[in-house]
Amino acid sequence: MTWHVRAVGLPYGEDPGDWWIDESGEMHDEPIADADDLPGEFVLPGLADAHAHPAIGADGVTPLAWAKQQTADWGDIGVCLIRDVGSPGGVTLDITPTAGSPLYVSAGRFLAPAGRYFPELLVEPVEVEELTAAAVAEVDKGATWVKVIADFPNFEAGTGPEPNYPLDVIAAMIEAVHAKGARVAAHCTIDNVDALVAAGIDSIEHGSGLTEDVISDMAARGTAWTPTLSAMTALRDSPDTPAAIRDRIRESCERLGDLLPTAVMLGVPVLAGTDTYGPISKEVALLAELGLTPTQALAAASVWPRQYLGVTGRADIVTYAHDPREDPSQLDNPTAVVVDGVRRR
């Protein structure tokens, strides 16, 4: 199926034009005969959620492992690419794609020691001496990413996060995963993030301990950053979060207004991710509130993740009646949605 739309090309365009989308998902300004018309005044090549957990729900700030695999039908609102960065027992590796479904890039199970992550989600704890073997096992099951919980707070004691694994152990795991052709994402909220980046980590998730010096190193190495602002602000504002942790998150959020624009300026791939606190429109709005331009915030939820994850050859198209750069809530109400060549709206 091929498509035609007369619209402003997002995230960067300003003037309307005629676009034809071929079966490989490429947009052209040369006509394609017999293409079906799509309504809409603005067109985007599919939204992307680069930090999501389709098999996890949330009750306030407490994550919940759902009884069976749940894959939110995000395709209906134009989320066409989802990087799952961890699931209980790696259940999202068993997602069976269907026609017109979003593309899932899955990381398998969480890699954390016993007592050092949410107990509801840590089906199979991974002790220090098991880390490399456990990560490689997830890749062998089909994961193209693995997710290491590099640090975690003690919620019962109300104390801040501490490292879960020695850095030399994480470095050895990264080397083994890279040798298998996969990549490593790190849950990281403390100031040892510089050593993780130096060890070759591929993406920093959350990153509340980042500094300008570390961001410069990330830019040089091509390390991505998914700040998960929706999750950070939810924890910051929840009365269920211990006061000391709330204060620490509040300080981190205040610094992000400087760090996020710097990261984009230096070329760090900044990726929008909702964690378990969607929708993606909220994440885009928060990115814009904390220093990105509206165009950059939308790019972080669309073309930048697609480029970083190397996603090509999919006919993912979303159109809107109004410009989501002016009002991110428009992302919740697309005019037309085509996911991998199948029109869903």
Image (cartoon, helix red, strand yellow):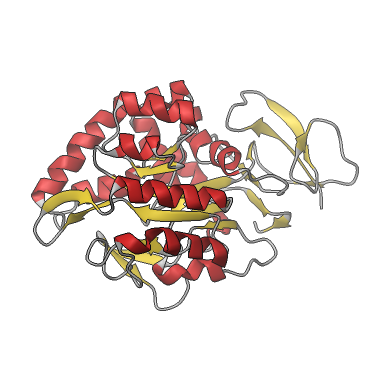
Judge by depth and name the residue closer to the eye, 218 or 95: 218
Residue 246: x %, y % from top left: 15, 46
* Residue 12 to residue 108: above or below: above
Residue 170: x %, y % from top left: 36, 49
What count of labels does the image hold? 0
10 vs 221, left or right, is: right
Quadrant housing the C terminus = bottom right
Residue 319, picture quadrant: top right
Residue sitting farthest toward the bottom:
67
**Residue 53 seen in render:** no
* Residue 276 to residue 310: above or below: below
Looking at the image, which residue is at 33% across and 46% down? Answer: 168
228 vs 299, left or right, is: left
* Residue 180 to residue 8: above or below: below
Judge by depth and name the residue closer to the eye, 215 or 298: 215
Judge by depth and name the residue closer to the eye, 21 or 81: 81
Residue 79: x %, y % from top left: 55, 51
Looking at the image, which residue is at 55% across and 55% down? Answer: 144
Residue 250: x %, y % from top left: 19, 39
23 vs 61, left or right, is: right
Looking at the image, which residue is at 26% across and 45% down? Answer: 233
Looking at the image, which residue is at 82% across and 53% down? Answer: 1
**Residue 164 seen in render:** yes
